[in-house]
Amino acid sequence: MTIPTHYQRIGGEAGVRQLVDRFYDHMDELPEAWNIRKLHAESLDSSRQKLFDFLSGWMGGPQLYKQKHGEPFLRRRHLPFPIGDAERDQWMHCMRLALEEVVEDDRLRNELYQAFVKVADHMRNQAALHGVQHPRP
């Protein structure tokens, strides 16, 4: 018996696209996400496509990012941008909202949230502030 991937469980291409779109909609609209929004280009089209490509493979679907851009090397690609606790937390806030809107299955939503927390923590390249807690669902 084959265990379905996160990609399959979220609804394949359509589910990943919806998650990415809601994530960037929140980033673009929420004042509390301004610090991370200003790190992006005026148009979010390229960022949307790259995140969609990355998440497709990361969730167990087609390796679109690798096919188009090579190995992700996420942390290295993000080094030019100052990412500290505040930016991580803003990113996670937008992703949490997107997950709540797109992923109906509580177990899948929690699995993805916990995985995103690890990725977001890994992206930090600024000194951490002591005593800061992760946002929780």
Image (cartoon, rainbow, N blue to C red):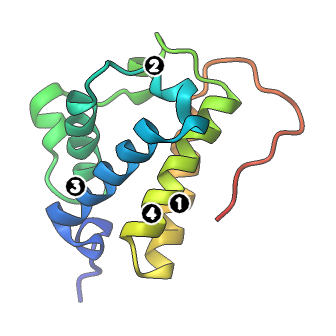
**Residue 71 showing in the rendered view:** no
Disc 1 to disc 3, C-alpha distance: 17 Å
What label does residue 39 carry, if any? 2
Q: Secondary structure at mark 4?
A: helix
Q: Quadrant of the C terminus?
A: bottom right
The x and y percentages for residue 4 are 27, 78
* Mark 4 touches mark 1? (CB < 8 Å): yes
Name the residue rendered at 10%, 30% in the picture: 68
Say which of marks 1 and 3 sits in front.
Answer: 3
Q: Which badge, 2 or 3, is on the more N-terminal residue? A: 3
The x and y percentages for residue 1 are 24, 89
Name the residue rendered at 29%, 71% in the picture: 10
Disc 4 to disc 1, C-alpha distance: 8 Å
- Which residue in the protein does label 3 denote? 17
Query: Is 134 above or below relative to 106?
Result: above
Say which of marks 2 and 1 sits in front.
Answer: 2
Q: Amino acid at mark 4?
A: Leu
- Which residue in the protein does label 1 denote? 113
Disc 2 to disc 1, C-alpha distance: 22 Å
The x and y percentages for residue 3 are 29, 80
Q: In front: 1, or 87?
A: 87
Say which of marks 4 and 1 sits in front.
Answer: 4
- Which residue in the protein does label 4 denote? 99
Q: Which badge, 1 or 3, is on the more N-terminal residue? A: 3
